[in-house]
Amino acid sequence: MPKLKSTYLLIISMTMLLVNAFIIFSMASFDRMVYIIFFYHVASAWLSYISFGISLICHILYMTKKEIKWSLHGKNSVIIGVAFSGFTLITGSLWFNATSGNYNNIYWQWSDYRQTMTLILFFSFLAYLVFGNMIENREKKARMTALLGIVLFPMVPLSFFSAIIFSSLHPLITPDPSQSGYIYWDGLKIFCLLINLIAISIFYYYCMQELLEIDKAKEQLDIIIQKKKNEDS
């Protein structure tokens, strides 16, 4: 994608986020400003899962087609997923600390399965990135990281369903107010959530394009370095 068009994606994404932020701030029904975190926390959590899901597809495609581009796409999607899952952990801790009496001004609860499993998910794919950087051979790196990415993916549904299967302080978005820890399915709030999700999904695509450009520049630099070594020898 041309650089100019890629920049348009960033502008569109940031504009949508800013306009949506204005709508969220103007909601008179909110008694506490901390609830604003909710819209960005949930959207970033969704996108982190989507990023890891796309990385799984790319890793499978690499294993079947052996085309290096799928390995790069998978790796780049993991980078974005790790960033968004880290943001999810931070905003989630701040939000729960401010809104849940069960936390008693404590930002972390190891007994909360959703919080703990998301942390494990974050460190698992962070380890994936570290492991990949330790391998110099391009084909071996692509093969090993693809296998690791596939093996680690079950952490994603485990993180998502942990709040449903196990006991958790994490609230649920549901239209049934009789359920424990529910967040009522308010149309305007869901609309704002969807706008944020669309905006950061566009931002995700922008980041993927930028990371691909970095990969191409790195490949060209490696070719120049290797050529220089051959000339010197």
Image (tube, grey):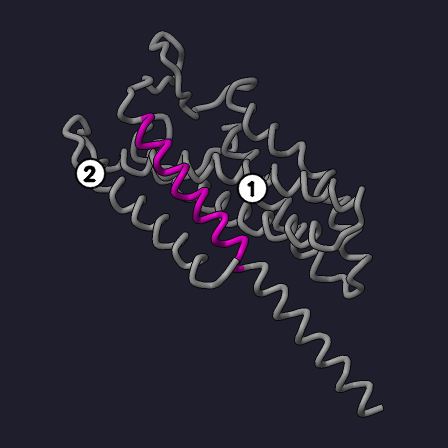
Image position of 84 (left or right of 229): left
- Residues 36 and 73: in front is 73
Q: Quadrant of the C terminus?
A: bottom right
Q: Residue furthest left?
A: 28
Region in magenta:
190-210
Residue found at x 23% / y 36%: 24
The amino acid type of the residue labelled 2 equals: Phe
Q: Which residue is mark 2?
A: 25
Residue found at x 39% / y 16%: 174
Quadrant in which residue 30 is drawn: top left
Tag of residue 51: 1
Q: As displayed, is residue 10 above or below residue 174? A: below
Quadrant in which residue 129 is drawn: bottom right
Circle 1 sits in a helix, a strand or a loop, which is it? helix
Magenta residue check for 207: yes
- Residues 37 and 204: in front is 204
Residue 92 visible somewhere in the drawing: no
